[in-house]
C-alpha cells in the first residue's frame, strides 16, 4: 500500500476498482505520455497536469500503511523461515 495510491485501486487491468468505479470512465487519455488515473498520482509523467476527478478516491491513513507493511513483513518472514530457518 502506497500513501499516494487510492485504497480502492486493484490495477488498471480490472474493469472496476474495489469501490465499483469503472476505470475507463475516470482515465484521462494523453497523447504525449501515459494516461492519467485519479487513483495513481505521480504515475508516469503528468507534466504538472491536474489529475482526473474521482468521487470515491480515498488515500490510506498512516495507520493503514503501517498495518499493511507489518502484514507483508510477517508473510515474508513466514515464507523465508520455512526455507532458511530465519525468524
Image (cartoon, helix red, strand yellow):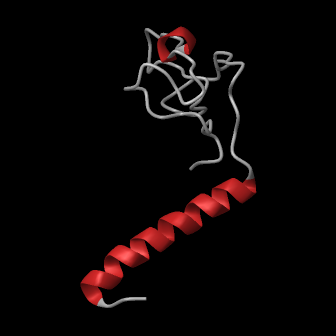
- Please state which of residues 4 and 87 is positioned toward the viewer in this rendering: 87
Q: Up-down: is 14 above or below 42?
A: above
x, y percent for residue 33: 44, 18
x, y percent for residue 35: 47, 18
Q: What is the quadrant of the C terminus in the image?
A: bottom left
Q: Exactly how many numbered labels are in the figure?
A: 0
Q: Is residue 3 left or right of residue 71?
A: right
Q: Up-down: is 85 above or below 32?
A: below
Q: Toward which corner of the image does residue 82 lie, by quadrant? A: bottom left
Task: Identify the residue shown where x is 68% and y is 16%.
Answer: 53
x, y percent for residue 37: 55, 22
- Please state which of residues 6 and 33 is positioned toward the viewer in this rendering: 6
Q: Is residue 65 left or right of residue 16?
A: right
Q: Is residue 62 left or right of residue 19?
A: right
x, y percent for residue 39: 59, 29
Task: Identify the residue shown where x is 54% and y is 11%.
Answer: 28
Task: Identify the residue shown where x is 57% and y is 13%.
Answer: 26
Task: Identify the residue shown where x is 37% and y is 26%.
Answer: 13
Q: Residue furthest left?
A: 83
Amino acid at each position: 500500500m502506497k500513501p499516494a495510491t487510492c485504497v480502492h485501486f486493484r490495477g488498471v487491468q480490472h474493469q472496476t476498482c474495489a469501490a465499483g468505479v469503472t476505470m475507463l470512465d475516470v482515465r484521462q487519455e494523453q497523447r504525449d505520455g501515459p494516461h492519467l488515473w485519479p487513483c495513481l498520482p505521480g504515475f508516469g509523467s503528468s507534466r504538472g497536469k491536474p489529475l482526473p476527478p474521482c468521487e470515491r478516491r480515498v488515500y490510506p491513513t498512516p495507520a493503514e500503511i503501517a498495518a499493511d507493511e507489518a502484514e507483508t513483513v510477517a508473510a515474508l518472514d513466514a515464507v523465508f523461515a520455512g526455507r532458511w530457518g530465519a525468524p
